[in-house]
Every structure is written in structure tokens, then in C-alpha cells.
Amino acid sequence: MAKQPAEQVVLAVAVAVAVVVLCAAAAAPGAEAACDALQLSPCAGAIIGNAAPSASCCSRMKEQQPCLCQYARDPNLQRYVNSPNGKKVLAACHVPVPSC
């Protein structure tokens, strides 16, 4: 019977280590950002209108950079990514125009 509590401790430690590893992987700097075009809403005035992109816009644009090809392939979003103003915003935010 003394073995059973020890096995439970080992199992609990193994589960805890697995959780820590998964959390560390999710928070790693190289972890891919979740693609959500709504995160680019601070850029709407610059992309749709002719306003200068805000710091918030550029920050979000950099966060969403890994998703830009996905947005460029989306029929509902491609006109914004490929528009002249969209390209101006990318340039102003120092985010390369995606080559998809």
C-alpha cells in the first residue's frame, strides 16, 4: 500500500511538468500569433481612409505579420492587404509586404 501514494506523487509531478512545458511553448517568443483580422481594427482608418497609422496599429500589424498571407488569400480581406493604402501602412510600420 505504501507504493500507491508514491505512484500518485510521481503522476502528479509528471502532469505538472507537462503543464509547465505546454505553457512555456505557448508563451515562447517564436510561437505563432493567433490569426484574428479584428486585431487590426486600429489600422482601419489608415487602410480604408488616408490617416497615418497609429503606434497601436503598427504594434498589431507586427503581431499579425505571420497571418498576412492568410488574410491576402481571404476573399473578404485581400482587397485591404493588397490595396495601395494597405501597402503604405505596412511600409510605415516597417512590416514587409507579404510575398505569398
Image: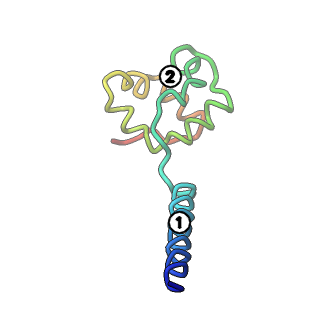
In the image, 13 versus 21, the foreground residue is 13
Q: Residues within 10 Å of mark 2 (few under 14, many from 20)?
A: some
| For residue 11, above or below residue 22 | below
What type is the residue that disc 2 sits on? Asn
The spot of residue 94 in percent (x, y) is 58, 40
The spot of residue 30 in percent (x, y) is 52, 57
What residue lies at 54% left-to-right and 29% top-to-bottom?
40
The secondary element bearing badge 2 is classed as helix
Quadrant in the rendering for residue 99: top left
Q: Nearer the viewer, mark 1 or mark 2?
A: 1
Q: Which residue in the rendered view is the most extreme toward the front?
A: 1
What type is the residue that disc 1 sits on? Val
Quadrant in the rendering for residue 46: top right
Label annotation for residue 21: 1
Numbered disc total: 2
| For residue 13, above or below residue 59 | below
- In the rendered view, how is the structure colored? rainbow
What residue lies at 53% left-to-right and 66% top-to-bottom?
21
What residue lies at 33% left-to-right and 28% top-to-bottom?
74
Q: Which residue is mark 2?
A: 85
